[in-house]
Amino acid sequence: MKQKNKNKNFKPDLDMYQAMGLSPEVISYGENILEELKERFAAIDRVAEYNQLKVLKAMQEAKVSEACLSGTTGYGYNDLGRDTLEEVYAKIFGTQDALVRPQITCGTHALALALMSNLRPGDELLSPVGKPYDTLEEVIGIRPSKGSLAEYGITYRQVDLLKDGSFDYEGIRQAVNGRTRLVTIQRSKGYQTRPTLSVSAIGELISFLKDLKPDLICMVDNCYGEFVETMEPSQVGADMVVGSLIKNPGGGLAPTGGYIAGTKECVENAACRLTSPGLAKEVGASLGMMNAFYQGLFLAPTVTAGALKGAVFAANVYERLGFAVIPDGREERHDIIQAVTFGTPEGVVAFCKGIQAAAPVDSFVTPEPWDMPGYDSKVIMAAGAFVSGSSIELSADGPIKPPYAVYFQGGLTWYHAKYGILKSLQQLVEERVVSLSDFVENF
Ligand SMILES: *Cc1c(COP(=O)(O)O)cnc(C)c1O
């Protein structure tokens, strides 16, 4: 779909962008695309506005006070900030209770905790949406690992999605048996090519599962999905939603942490496992984290909206240049991840160099493909983040193997995401991986 510059007189902050290393043709190409995204962006803003009010309402109802912002040390008995924050999370997710702790080290830990605490030897775990996120393979024991569910006599079954991305209801019906205790549903596609699930699709799946077996525990891996829609999976029947605070709900400010929001029973099981039987939620000092957890949560709806706009913009920028993008430029979004397939190692490397060069931290560093533990090919990563490894901040990574795709996500502000994407395009142009001459005139 070739398109000529429609508005030749348009002058975005040309001088500033040029001072930041963008050529006039790159700026113009980007602005032409943005012209067509106004409605999409307005819809994203409306979701953010709703979610902002949802967060605010929860904070007011839970009576968040100045005293909540300072933390405890030692055992952390009667930690007002921690207990109130967990109440706020429960209100936002529409659950009976929540566990939100700096002692939950990452998303994988939160998911492992939810699984290990709610399953018992002899139980079976079912994933009705295909292979779960890579790091869960060792948690479950799909790849043998110390301390996996398999070691404790918990078996695993998986039903793949059908070719068109829909649920294999017949396969699921056959997979559910007397031992099936917990179902794990991953909302985001993660680094796969299947579609991300909408909250309403997750709701339909859960209704089907509960009709088959009413006492099934339905858990949703909510990573990258929080605040993308106005509803969360826990509002359509999920017994637990689980995620990382260095993704969407930490709003970029949480320096570490994870959450599990769900039924009283599920959360209590998780708390007994995180701390100890008998101690459960009563201990766990919040240290100095509370201010960042509250303020990050408060900002999370707008931060997520910025990241979403970046993902939509990137899809359109690269789709028009002829690259395969998932999701495509027009699809409705259910998470903040954008995949772009460049088809060549040069494309992947140039893209990541551009993202790195756009970072507020370590912008002067050149990312290189390296042999990362756990991967079967070299991987290149771009991140210049305030919080190490944070993927709500602008970041990209790509394995150096066919089909040579990069996965791009985050951006604490839309303007940073926009600049990062244009900077990646600039890099691709300079390395002659793409040419814009067919798309813009007069430069
Ligand atoms: C990021 C992610 C995880 C794991 O989280 P980490 O914080 O990287 O351990 C699990 N599932 C999905 C879908 C994710 O996106």
Image: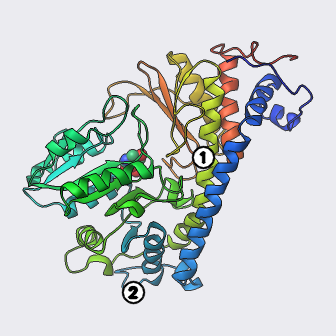
Classify 10 Å Cα crowding around label 1: few (below 14), some (14-19), many (20 and above): many
Can you tell which quarter of the image residue 67 is in? bottom right
Judge whether 366 appears above or below 214 on screen.
above
The quarter holding residue 171 reads top left
Quarter in which the C terminus is drawn: top right
Q: Is mark 1 within 8 Å of ligand 1?
A: no
Left or right: 359, with 194 as reference point: right
Residue at the disc numbered 1: 307
Front residue of 161/313: it is 161
**Mark identifier at residue 184:** none
Residue pictured at 86% horizontal, 34% vertical: 14
Q: Position of residue 90 (x, y in %)?
A: 43, 72
Q: Nearer the viewer, mark 1 or mark 2?
A: 1
- Whether residue 215 is visible, yes or no, is yes
Q: Where residue 261 sits: x, y (%)?
A: 37, 66
Vertically, is 54 above or below 148? below
Q: Judge the density around disc 2: few (<14), some (14-19), many (≥20) Cα neighbours within 10 Å.
A: some
Furthest residue toward right = 9
Amino acid type shown at disc 1? Ala
Q: Which residue bears the numbered disc 2?
A: 78
Residue 338: x, y in percent?
Answer: 53, 36
SS at badge 2: loop
Q: Is residue 42 above or below residue 2?
A: below
Along the line of sight, which residue is nearer the eye, 439 or 167?
Answer: 167
* Residue for point 59% across, 45% down: 308
Q: Quadrant of the N terminus?
A: top right
The residue that appears at 39% across and 62% down in the rendered structure is: 234
